[in-house]
């Protein structure tokens, strides 16, 4: 890898560390190619991406960033899983690590905060952006539904009374 390629990798990693909602750092030693492909697919399906890079280049990319404390995690064979959604990559990595002992979550970052393995686990337990939007939409729709039901209830009651009176008159 020549100097220009290294600078391109450093720039790419710098963008990942600053623009991603969450970055998860894990050891992947012992994973087969098929297992690594499954990890990449599961993170991609969740809306994220996976990147393997040399630790030295990643440490250079972290210099001067708010998450520079994450550099302590970069030892051994490390992989980065990241996503714009602050929960997606963490959920996908935790789900994969639950089924595969060879992937060990070391920590990561969320925004400007550096996370330990327990912090990544807590982030993974949070609802995703789409789940939160669905919850908010249902909360916003509930009062309108209740109002419509309350407005329609008297008319429904009157119709019921009229049909009962009509049945009595016919009998």
Image (spheres, grey):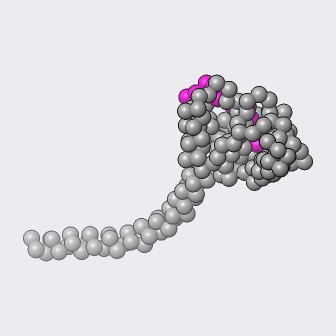
Where does the image place residue 169, in percent across and percent down from the top left?
A: 13, 75
Name above or below for residue 96 compared with residue 44: above
Name above or below for residue 114 compared with residue 130: above
Residue at the outermost right position: 64
Where does the image place residue 153, in percent across and percent down from the top left?
A: 38, 69
Left or right of 160, for residue 86? right
Q: Nearer the viewer, residue 31 or 66?
A: 31
Residue placed at 64% from the left, 29% from the top?
103
Task: Report if residue 112 lies within the magenta region.
Answer: no
Residue at the outermost left position: 171
Residue placed at 75% from the left, 46% from the top?
110
The segment highlighted magenta reads 99-109
Quarter of the image for residue 140 reads: bottom right
Quarter of the image for residue 106 reads: top right
Task: Report if residue 102 lies within the magenta region.
Answer: yes
Where does the image place residue 37, in percent across and percent down from the top left?
A: 57, 37
Residue placed at 60% from the left, 41% from the top?
40
Residue placed at 68% from the left, 45% from the top?
82
């Amino acid at each position: 890898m020549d100097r220009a390629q290294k600078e391109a990798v450093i720039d790419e990693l710098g963008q990942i560390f600053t623009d991603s909602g969450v970055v998860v750092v894990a050891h992947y030693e012992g994973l087969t190619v098929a297992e690594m492909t499954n990890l990449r697919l599961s993170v991609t399906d969740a809306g994220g991406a996976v990147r393997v890079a040399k630790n030295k280049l990643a440490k250079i990319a972290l210099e001067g960033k708010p998450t520079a404390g994450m550099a302590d995690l970069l030892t051994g064979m490390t992989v980065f899983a990241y996503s714009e959604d602050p929960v997606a990559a963490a959920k996908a990595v935790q789900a994969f690590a639950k089924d595969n002992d060879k992937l060990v979550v070391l920590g990561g970052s969320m925004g400007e905060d550096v996370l330990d393995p327990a912090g990544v686990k807590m982030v993974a337990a949070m609802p995703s952006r789409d789940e939160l939007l669905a919850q908010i939409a249902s909360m916003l729709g509930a009062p309108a539904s209740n109002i419509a039901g309350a407005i329609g209830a008297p008319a429904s009651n009157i119709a019921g009374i009229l049909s009962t009176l009509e049945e009595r008159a016919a009998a």
